Amino acid sequence: MLNTLLFVTSLSVAPLQPQDDAPVSQEAINEAIDRGVQFLLSAQHVDGSWYDGKTNVYLNPEGGATALVVAALLHSGIDHEHQAIVRGAAYARSRPMQMFYGTVTRILMEDILSEHRDDKQLKALSEFLVGGSNSDYYDYPGVDKPGDLSITQYAVLGMWMAKKNGVKIPDKVLETTLKTIMRHQQADGGWSYFGQTASTSPYQQGGVGGAATWSMTTAGMSSLLFILDALGEKHRATRKHKDDVEESLNKGYEWLKKHMSYEYNFAPTGDEAQNQQNRQWDLYYYYTIERLGTVAGVEELGGEDWYKAGAEFLVKSQLENGGWAPSSTPQDPGYARECGTAFALLFLNKATASVTGKNVKRKQRSVASLDPDNANVDLRVNLTKRPVAWVARFGRNILDTYGKKGQFGLRVEKVTYYINDEVIGEVEGNLDVNSGSERFALELDIGPGKHQVTALITAAPEPEQGFPVSDERFELRSPPVEINVDWTMTEAQRLSLDELTANLIPGSGPTISVSSERDSSGEGSFAVDGTTATNWLPDDTDSAPSIRMSWKRGLKAKTLVLTPPQVRYSMSRQYPNGEVEVESYWGIGRQLPKKIEVSINGKETEYELKGEAREHVDLGKTHTIKSLEIKILETRPANENAASGTGFAEIELIGKVKKRR
């Protein structure tokens, strides 16, 4: 069962009214990117993953979703050593290669990691991708579903990126895919989801089968260009098919001029039911626009500046929590999606253009106090790997009282910086001169968590002309600047990272049974599926809920790790300028297991649990475990707002832990 419970705390909430007629500036785009980044960072799970839900055609999607988010964060300027990137990349790399979407997003991640990429992984991913090629569209391994252009465009993107990184991709695979895409182009110049197979496919549903859509047409066109670029201008296949590709692209451009819109992903048929379904892929569509506009080297698509039109829609449709939701759902923060937000960020950052150096460049992000315009001291903190605190300016009333007319500074003796009311450093001033534009910057050595940074200014009044500075001193204290240091790894995060590949259960194929389950579709499997984003929740009426696993071959482990159900918490606040910000994060919720009975190969032992996010249970010695049963004997609420229900988000048996460098 996917964790969907949302707890909301409201602090003076007021809806933010979008100014639909106002032009979108680069500053607004930068702010939207920053807010999108914060949403994604808050959405990361305790095991380092991001998750956007399971589907019947996309098994184990968490590795691919995680890689997509990591790539979007890197393109948005997050450092490769940020704990969320390190943990996310490690999680994505630990997941099996089962579907081509996830394989390609992992290639996308390795590509942007550049010199920090895992070349061994990149090669293995590329080989898996090439192995899925055939005489038609790419399909879904192990799933009874025909191939389609959607998965094929990602296969093309992955092969193009792999080749850019030095991985050998067979020319025959590229040429066959090129001919397949051109063969499925419709007579009017557009592309549909299934192409020629749509008329006989049991999956055909309006535009998802037969009618051309904006997303599929931009996908088909960009894929042709990516293939030609991968083959090279002088390649035999390029010379052979160049004219056909040019004709195909011209028909596509004409189709876009007639039908393309930047508001929603529609098929131009007027079928509302069909278009409502297509609208769930709006944000996915924007990433196809970005790829086509970039690889084609054009500023306009469909008669409009593609980046300006797309950025305007994305900035104005961003939700209060920084995320984006497809237009097929209510435009409410609770419907924001991790993958959709990643697609929006890839568009706004012009991610494909990163290989040419022409992508969006943004200024360093800094935070201030809640009302800097009315503060005596406007303190700022740059949110970098090593945060820097600095004084932006002094209030006008302070300058009028203690300063010199026409000057912006003071006679500063020293600036003392505090973190959580403790002195952490001091920057000397110079009483002999007016400080002018001096920033008194100090690099902060600060650990993970939420902190308050303040500055105490010690200064002297401006002396009369011709007189020395007097012994009189005055002090100014800045309002606190609240920062959340989320780029440094906590000990719990480091332990989770170390144990990521030591969990013996994923891939071991246990036989699972449960005493009960709210959502019977999982049959307990969500507790051992390798992600803390899903969970096993027994029925509320189950007085002694239990889950049992067994193996033909035993697993050797000494440590059991239990993660209780995670829920999404959300808090809204309104700033003095009227803007509303919604912060959210994952945390433990519901009724936490307090006492459990663990049966290993039939031998029972009781344990008291502390209620930690990843609870470690020392089994005393290394066991060869052929059967493991966990029974919840007692529970306690996670907090005063805890919902009903108990269970586990993940159960791990930890084997040998490899120490990371």
Image: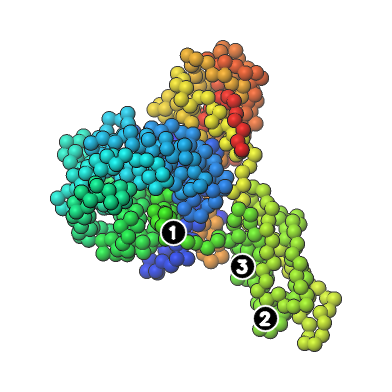
Residue type, label 2: Gln
Determine contact: label 2, label 1, CB under 8 Å.
Answer: no
Q: Please state the horizontal and vertical placement of residue 445, each as a whole percent of the image.
A: 69, 53
Q: Please state the horizontal and vertical placement of residue 481, each as a whole percent of the image.
A: 64, 60
Where disc 2 sits, the SS reads: loop
Which quadrant is home to the N terminus?
Answer: top left
Which residue is labeled 2 in the image?
407
Residue type, label 3: Pro
Residue closest to the eye, 43 or 365: 365
As drawn, the label of residue 357 is 1
Q: Quadrant of residue 196?
A: top left
Q: CA distance from mark 3 to mark 2?
A: 19 Å
Disc count in the image?
3
As drawn, the label of residue 336 is none
Residue type, label 1: Gly
Residue 566 seen by the camera: no
Determine contact: label 1, label 3, CB under 8 Å.
Answer: no
Question: Furthest-right residue in view?
Answer: 471
Which quadrant is home to the C terminus?
Answer: top right
Q: Quadrant of residue 413?
A: bottom right
As drawn, the label of residue 372 is 3
Residue closest to the eye, 511 or 48: 48
Is residue 151 found left or right of 583 in the rendered image? left
Where disc 3 sits, the SS reads: helix
Sequence-wise, the earlier of marks 3 and 2 is 3
Q: Please state the horizontal and vertical placement of residue 185, each as a whole percent of the image.
A: 19, 48
Residue 601 seen by the camera: yes
Q: Residues within 10 Å of mark 3 (few under 14, many from 20)?
A: some
Determine contact: label 3, label 2, CB under 8 Å.
Answer: no
